[in-house]
Image: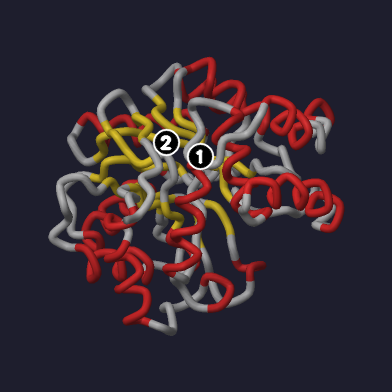
Amino acid sequence: MAYKPGTITIGGDLEVSKIGYGAMQLTGPQVWGPYPDHEGGVQLLRSLLDQGVNFIDTADVYGPHTNELLIREALYPYPDELIIATKGGFVRGGYEYSTLGWVGNPKYLRQSLMMSLQRLGLDRVQLYYLHSGHATDAPFEDQIGELKAMQDEGYIQHIGLSNVTPEQFATARGIADIAAVTALYNVGNRMGGKLLAAAEEAGAVFSPWHPASLRDGGGNAEHVASILAPIAAAHGVTPQQLAIAWLLHCSPTMLPIPGTKSLAHLRENVAAASVNLSEDEVATITELVDETTE
């Protein structure tokens, strides 16, 4: 029987598994083009609910577009308990990551949402993120205002923010209710630490990306792995599972979204929610990074 990871509530009414699924890996190399093992991707997505996972995180730029289409092919018509989050605001002009950019034009954001709804086969998306706060082609306030307008029109249930500063989060909250935020935060890299603190204070869900990474801010994993290895061994789990478990111990607002291409790995990710760490173990991992310098 699959382990059930428990639940967390987004926006007061979306009850989702405390460990979600980040679907970005179900694309081609460098997140460009369709996922090569098409049938394998379909079967993995169809296994999520059986593993206790009812939250899928995607974005229009994954592929671009192919990830949303794969989700629809695999899961439409969607079970009532399935919650899908998608994002808009990034653009991609080719295979190289250097072609990635940001667009905040409100009309573009509206088009992005409408096209995501078409690809996913939805009339309303349950959680829609502004994918980046870096766009400078339109005032940030206008970008949030457009999302709020589309929410008022019934196309968005809850609004989220990705890759924003705490200051932008505060600004956005003055315009619309913000139910969730995403940022880079894990055992080795706490870049999103200030945003996590702001989310906790505001009662918003915090969804860390690269949640199982052991790499530090310099891109090295050896030191972090050496600290985690004995703790992980004591609990009979992998260091990556321990990394996810630590996140869940850090904050009640935490919603990790590890991605994988493997059913076995998916089961490992979900099982991380069953790891009970002592206060000393949590402190040892927390002290790996001085968050005041992040």
Indicate left or right for 117 with 95 as reference: left
Q: Residue at x 73, y 45 (%)?
A: 231
Above or below for 202 versus 118: above
Residue 248 at what x, y percent from top left?
54, 35
Q: CA distance from mark 2 to mark 1?
A: 10 Å
Q: Which mark is residue 160?
A: 2
Q: Label 1 amino acid?
A: Ser
Judged left or right of residue 43, residue 166 is: right
Of labels 2 and 1, earlier in sequence is 2
Residue closest to the eye, 157 or 260: 260
In the image, taking residue 200 as reference, residue 291 lies left or right, namely right
Is residue 63 in sight in this rendering? no
Neighbours of disc 2 within 10 Å: few (<14), some (14-19), many (20+): many
Q: Which residue is mark 1?
A: 207
Measuring 34% from the left and 29% from the top, which residue is drawn there?
9
Residue plotted at (81% across, 25% down): 292
Residue 51 x/y as whole percent: 34, 56
Considering the image in quadrants, where does the C terminus appear? top right
Q: Are marks 2 and 1 in contact (CB under 8 Å)?
A: yes
Query: 10 Å neighbourhood of mark 1: few (<14), some, or many (≥20)?
Result: many
Q: Is residue 73 above or below residue 112?
A: below
The residue nearer to you, when weighing 132 against 41, is 41
Which residue is pictured at 58% across the width and 21% down the height?
198
Task: Describe the element under mark 2 as helix, strand or loop.
Answer: strand
